[in-house]
Image (cartoon, helix red, strand yellow):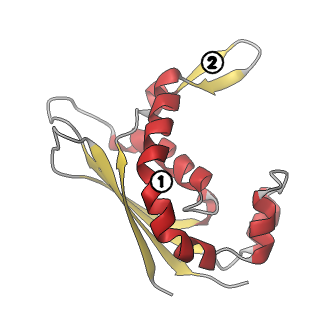
Amino acid sequence: MDQEIALCIPLPVSVNAAYRNLTGKGRVKTGQALSWETRAMHALKDDLKRYNPLITKNLTTRYKNTLANNSVSLAKLEREHSGLRYSVTYVFHFRSSSKSRDIFNFEKLLTDLLVKVGFLLDDCFISEGHVFRGEINPEYPCVDVKIRVLTYGD
């Protein structure tokens, strides 16, 4: 099964700026990370509508039922969807080339967002990932994302 989803998401904050420690609460997202998440979810609104049939096709009835019940364990998801594998590619387009950046520091928030909005069932199902530095985009720093469903079976 070779199905591909192509997205363009606003450039996230680095994982170094995404979390902070709060006494009594542990690690929490910063205001910067929450603001980016809101912008990114808004940018993905049309993509969610466009790709909904493909996303829905790859979710079994059992998983659709778990969307309403957040108590499902990761082990249970892995058992129920053992044949599901994704390939994910990120191409980062920064505003300028003047700053050296560790491009892998930008992946975590993106992957978590793709799970949160439903493009990925869980990041444990990613069997291959590719991260690239793309062309500079001063007008709209963003990330081009490609998700391919490699295999699926119940």
Residue 91: image location, x then y, percent: 30, 55
Quarter of the figure that contains the C terminus: bottom right
Looking at the image, residue 44 sits to the left or right of residue 85; the answer is: left
Q: Nearer the viewer, residue 109 or 35?
A: 35
Residue 103: image location, x then y, percent: 33, 43
Looking at the image, residue 95 sits to the left or right of residue 54; the answer is: left
The label shown at residue 21 is 2
**Residue appearing at x 16%, y 50% in the figure:** 135
Residue 126: image location, x then y, percent: 55, 64
Q: Is residue 87 visible?
A: no
Inter-mark Cα distance, 1 to 2: 31 Å
SS label for mark 2: strand
Amino acid type for the residue under numbered disc 2: Asn
Amino acid type for the residue under numbered disc 1: Lys
User: Closer to the camera: disc 1 or disc 2?
Assistant: 1
Q: Is residue 46 visible?
A: yes
The label shown at residue 89 is none
**Residue appearing at x 17%, y 39% in the figure:** 139
Instruction: Quadrant for residue 130, please give it.
Output: bottom left
Q: Nearer the viewer, residue 126 or 117?
A: 117
